[in-house]
């Protein structure tokens, strides 16, 4: 057990206590603002990880609701019967009711144990978060980071034949339907700039004005010319940057 | 429409003191600074809602109190728009800027097309989702992660039943989570690198829901006749190809600053990889090299909404200073505070490369 958590574990015998699992440099301090007891300190340097004193925590749960990373939880071992109550923030849209059975999972999504929902509380401003409290065997309690109904991932995939042939040709400019093969053909002919490609193949002259295909064209050009992106430059931008009906330019409304 | 003497059409003309192009966090914050100082300010945005991309963010935000941290994105959007309007700025939605000419005038399409002249223009046009071509990328069901997010969170429409995401940066992780919230299945997240790009806390959120993240997997193609039916990815470690059954593919492979207007205006454009691509060169106060033209937010380099807010405020203060609406002393004080905050926001490991790029820009940006 890590130093901090040992203290959390001990304090949780007396009252519910927050467990702060935030170690990365994230520019963020709502936990500090949320805490009325001064138990969580981020300080002047917004990116430093919060410094937390479990001894001052009164287990109110405000930080659990407000942490944008959903990285704060509550631990309560007052029962003393080998069971613990763990509270996690829950932001799914579905129903969840007291008494329900649910899986408790760790930070990687691994199922730790099954638990029972004992309390649900809405908290955290005008658009609150549900704080879900579950009851589980206490030896798993420190590891719980979430709950879910599905037992495991929906991810499913199959291996594909080694000889699978990928289509080699596909559109690069979807507005004007210019294929990659066509672009390569013009490059082979010796065209060496975005403008030249645009004039000859119509890439970048469609509805989007080249904002989507431009990067790819720069890459293809760069491979041939060995020029950097900055040297290859951008498409010359001309008005209108958004499509507009000619009639409107001519003063016709609608 | 006024037809002049020679039958030549003249477009209606209008002027104001400061125009912000884009009503996202950067534009709204820039306009608020200006309007609060008594400067006639207009905000233009092509969308029908103010708040930029914040309107579709249902998660709570990082940052500190000044950035609405701990609140959900759409709440922050409403607050910023309200603050901006209360300060006296006019927010024109459904107004699209078609051109920004070298003489400094803007061509705008609202209810009709008109020319808008301003002493100061803050370009806060945001960014665009990066996409790249691959076999099948034009099939219905292939979309940017942000597009899926708009469908789900703004329009209440599911893009499909089963999604694969490409890219495990914060956007990919957050959107995967939000698709789950909306009731979709997320088959997996493909990541070409050997580690997750986004924050651990976001990674953990999707993993807790049982979503697998496939590291060292490269998207190869999408299969399907009339829409996405399967996604093919190559396992770069084993060299094998995997087929995932899904009807939606969301690309979360980064953003590109949307800086066409700056380029049209003649601003010096520089390519800064750390900031997403071509951006208008700007100094530490968000001034471009064209007088009266400022840039802020993702258009000045792709970062976070909290940074966009403070960059917008900084651009607003710089414009006010140049307009003579703020004393140099007051301007200096406000800029120092905003820069202090920006430094803090870029203080972590994820922010440091961007902080360094911004420093190099401020120092003039010479080729290495």
Image (tube, rainbow, N blue to C red):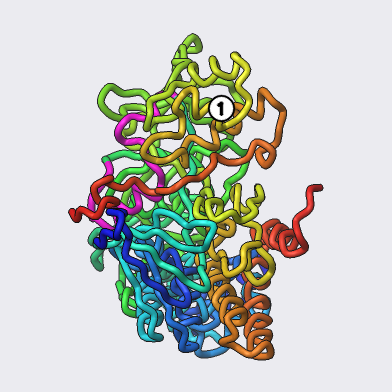
Q: Who's the residue at 40% across and 50% down the image?
A: B146
Q: Is residue A157 above or below residue B333?
A: above
Residue placed most toward the observer, B357 or B235: B357
Answer with the quarter of the image where residue B79 lies: bottom left
Q: Who's the residue at 64% across and 90% down the image?
A: B327
> Label 1 is found on which chain of the structure?
A
Residue A213 shown left or right of residue B281 in the figure: left
Viewport quadrant of the N terminus of chain B: bottom left
Q: Is residue B99 above or below residue B59?
A: above
The answer to whether residue B214 shows anywhere in this view is no
Residue placed most toward the observer, A225 or B322: B322
Q: Secondary structure at mark 1?
A: helix
Mark 1 Cα-neighbour bin, 10 Å: few <14, some 14–19, many ≥20: some
Q: Is residue B221 above or below residue B268?
A: above
Residue at the farthest front position: B5
Q: Residue B345 location, x and y as percent?
A: 62, 70
Q: Residue B257 location, x and y as percent?
A: 53, 52
Answer with the quarter of the image where residue A129 lies: bottom left
Q: Residue A52 location, x and y as percent?
A: 61, 78
The magenta stretch is B135-159
Q: What is the count of numbered marks?
A: 1
Question: Would residue A5 be counted in the magenta stretch?
Answer: no
Residue A128 shown left or right of residue B121 in the figure: left
Q: Is residue A16 above or below residue A168?
A: below
Q: Residue B36 location, x and y as percent?
A: 46, 87
The residue labelled by disc 1 is A196
Q: Who's the residue at 61% across and 77% down the image?
A: B318
Answer with the quarter of the image where residue A39 lies: bottom right
The answer to whether residue A142 shows anywhere in this view is yes
Q: Who's the residue at 66% across and 25% down the image?
A: A223
Residue placed most toward the observer, A54 or B215: B215
Question: Would residue B146 be counted in the magenta stretch?
Answer: yes
């Amino acid at each position: 057990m890590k130093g901090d958590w040992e203290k959390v574990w001990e304090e949780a015998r007396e009252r519910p206590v927050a467990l702060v699992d935030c170690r990365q440099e994230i520019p963020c301090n709502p936990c500090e603002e949320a805490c009325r007891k001064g138990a969580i300190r981020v300080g002047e340097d917004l990116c430093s990880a919060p410094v937390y004193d479990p001894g001052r925590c009164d287990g109110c749960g405000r930080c659990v609701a407000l942490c944008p990373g959903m990285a704060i939880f509550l631990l309560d071992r007052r029962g003393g019967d080998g069971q613990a109550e763990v509270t996690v923030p829950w932001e799914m849209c579905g129903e969840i009711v007291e008494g329900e059975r649910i899986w408790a999972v760790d930070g990687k999504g691994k199922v730790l144990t099954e638990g029972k929902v004992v309390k649900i509380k809405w908290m955290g401003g005008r658009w609150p978060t549900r704080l879900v409290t579950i009851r589980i065997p206490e030896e798993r309690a420190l590891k719980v980071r979430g709950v879910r109904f599905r037992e495991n991932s929906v991810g499913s995939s199959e291996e594909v034949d080694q000889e699978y042939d990928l289509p080699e040709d596909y559109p690069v400019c979807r507005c004007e339907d210019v294929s990659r093969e066509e672009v390569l053909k013009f490059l082979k002919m010796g065209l060496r700039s975005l403008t030249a490609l645009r004039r000859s193949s119509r890439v970048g002259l469609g509805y989007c004005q080249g904002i989507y295909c431009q990067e790819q064209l720069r890459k293809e050009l760069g491979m041939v010319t060995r020029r950097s992106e900055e040297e290859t430059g951008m498409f010359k931008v001309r008005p209108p940057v958004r499509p507009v009906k000619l009639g409107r330019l001519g003063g016709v409304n609608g | 429409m006024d037809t002049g003497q020679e039958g030549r059409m003249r477009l209606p003309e209008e002027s104001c003191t400061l125009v912000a192009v884009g009503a996202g966090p950067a534009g709204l914050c820039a306009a608020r600074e200006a309007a609060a100082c008594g400067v006639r300010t207009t905000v233009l945005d092509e969308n029908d809602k103010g708040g930029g991309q914040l309107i579709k963010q249902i998660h709570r935000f990082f940052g500190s109190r000044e950035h609405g941290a701990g609140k959900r994105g759409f709440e922050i959007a409403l607050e910023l728009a309200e603050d901006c309007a209360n300060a006296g700025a006019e927010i024109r939605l459904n107004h699209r800027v078609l051109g920004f000419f070298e003489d400094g005038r803007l061509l705008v399409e609202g209810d009709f097309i008109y020319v808008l002249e301003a002493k100061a223009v803050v370009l806060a046009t945001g960014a665009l989702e990066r996409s790249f071509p691959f076999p099948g990328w034009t099939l219905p069901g292939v979309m940017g992660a942000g597009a899926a997010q708009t469908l789900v969170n703004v329009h209440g429409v599911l893009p499909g039943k089963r999604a694969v995401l490409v890219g495990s940066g914060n956007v990919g992780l957050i959107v995967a989570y939000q698709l789950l919230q909306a009731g979709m299945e997320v088959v997996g997240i493909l990541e070409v690198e050997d580690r997750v790009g986004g924050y651990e806390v976001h990674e953990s959120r999707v993993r807790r829901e049982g979503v697998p993240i496939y590291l060292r997997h490269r998207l190869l193609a999408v299969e399907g006749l009339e829409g996405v039916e399967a996604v093919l990815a190559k396992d770069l470690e084993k060299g094998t190809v995997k087929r995932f059954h899904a009807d939606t593919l969301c690309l979360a492979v980064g953003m590109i600053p949307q800086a066409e207007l700056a380029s049209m205006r003649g601003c010096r454009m520089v390519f800064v990889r750390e900031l997403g691509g071509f951006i208008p060169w700007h100094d530490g106060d968000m001034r471009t090299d064209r007088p009266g033209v400022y840039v802020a937010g993702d258009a000045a380099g792709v970062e976070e909404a909290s940074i966009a807010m403070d960059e917008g405020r900084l651009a607003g203060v710089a414009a006010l200073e140049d307009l003579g609406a703020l004393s140099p002393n007051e301007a200096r004080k406000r800029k120092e505070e905003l820069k202090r905050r920006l430094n803090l926001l870029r203080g972590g490991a994820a922010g440091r490369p961007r902080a360094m790029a911004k420093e190099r820009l401020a120092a003039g940006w010479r080729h290495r």
